[in-house]
Image (tube, rainbow, N blue to C red):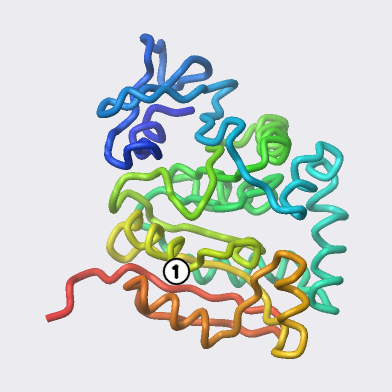
Amino acid sequence: MRRETLELLRCPKCGVGGLIPEAEVAGAAMAFGPARCVSCGARFPVHDGLIDFVGDRAKLKALQQAMELPWVARSWERYVRPAVDTVLTRGRLDHESEYTVLRNLIGSPPGPIVDLGCGAGLVLRRLSRDFSQVPVIGVDMSRPMLEEAMAQVRENAEAADFVRAQVPLMPFNDATLGAVVAVGFIHFIDELDELLREVARSLKPGGRFVATTYEAGKMLEPMHRTAGLSPRSEEALRASTAKAGLVEFERVRVSPFLLWKAERATSSPG
């Protein structure tokens, strides 16, 4: 983990303290050893550059448990995610078109980019190539997914850092991020209002949140929720976005998919 990325992080236990290597680190990156909170003293393991804020404390739903399986992580982007998309939405949005829209919605980020729910890293790797001027950071709760993403980044000689964390809390300091991207992720999250408040807090003024999700329709939504998913309508997304204080909501609809963005205001109203 690069020092510049470590400096963006804050302790998820006390919510205020910055993190420093517990022992002296040679060079510009921290590969191993604990990082310590300067406020509460909490220690978090770093292994092979991955900092772990979750440990063994995570409470997993059935779908999340599946993502902890190494074979799912290895085959996620090529086979599993397309199959899941087809089952959930009875249709598919090809990844190339999806990324092209996302890239346009991100614009020119004024700082680091976080890929929230980065999974095996397909989108993250493209972000690291297209936005090489800023740090790109993958965040996920699944260790096998992160390990697969890290392996792909190393194999392709790309640059990215990785954080194991459990949303809705975001382990980043206030107003430090240029963009937060969440591809096919927020329908796995129950606490969208809280997550968007955390995103708004972490973004720099003008920084954008860009996400993809799907609409299940009123008839099918109860069934999806029973399965542990949280699909939302455009109206619900707009309401949560406004409640978090994010502005400039825009969306691209490729039914039943929604690709949307909002941003942190560049100045206070009035």
Q: In this view, does 19 lie above or below 145?
A: above
Q: What crowding class fits label 1: few (fewer than 14 Cα within 10 Å), some (14-19), or many (20 or more)?
A: some
Front in this rendered view, residue 228 or 110: 228
Q: In this view, does 123 lie above or below 190?
A: above
Q: Where is residue 162 in the image (x, y as percent from the top left)?
A: 55, 36
Front in this rendered view, residue 100 or 50: 50
Front in this rendered view, residue 251 or 158: 251
Q: Where is residue 209 in the image (x, y as percent from the top left)?
A: 46, 65
Q: Position of residue 155 (x, y in %)?
A: 72, 31
Q: In which quarter of the image is the C terminus?
A: bottom left
Q: In this view, does 236 lie above or below 125?
A: below
The amino acid type of the residue labelled 1 equals Asp
Q: Quadrant of residue 217?
A: bottom right
- In this view, which residue lies farthest toward the left? 270
Left or right: residue 142 compared with residue 195: right
Residue at image point 28% right, 71% down: 265
Query: Disc count in the image?
Result: 1
Residue at image point 38% right, 27% down: 3
Residue at image point 48% right, 55% down: 168
Q: Is residue 229 above or below residue 181?
A: below
Q: In which quarter of the image is residue 197?
A: bottom left
Front in this rendered view, residue 37 or 177: 37
Left or right: residue 164 compared with residue 249: right
Q: Position of residue 9 (x, y in %)?
A: 37, 38
Please give the residue where the numbered disc 1 appears in the rendered image.
193
Question: Quick one: SS at disc 1?
Answer: helix
Left or right: residue 166 compared with residue 150: left
Residue at image point 32% right, 37% down: 14
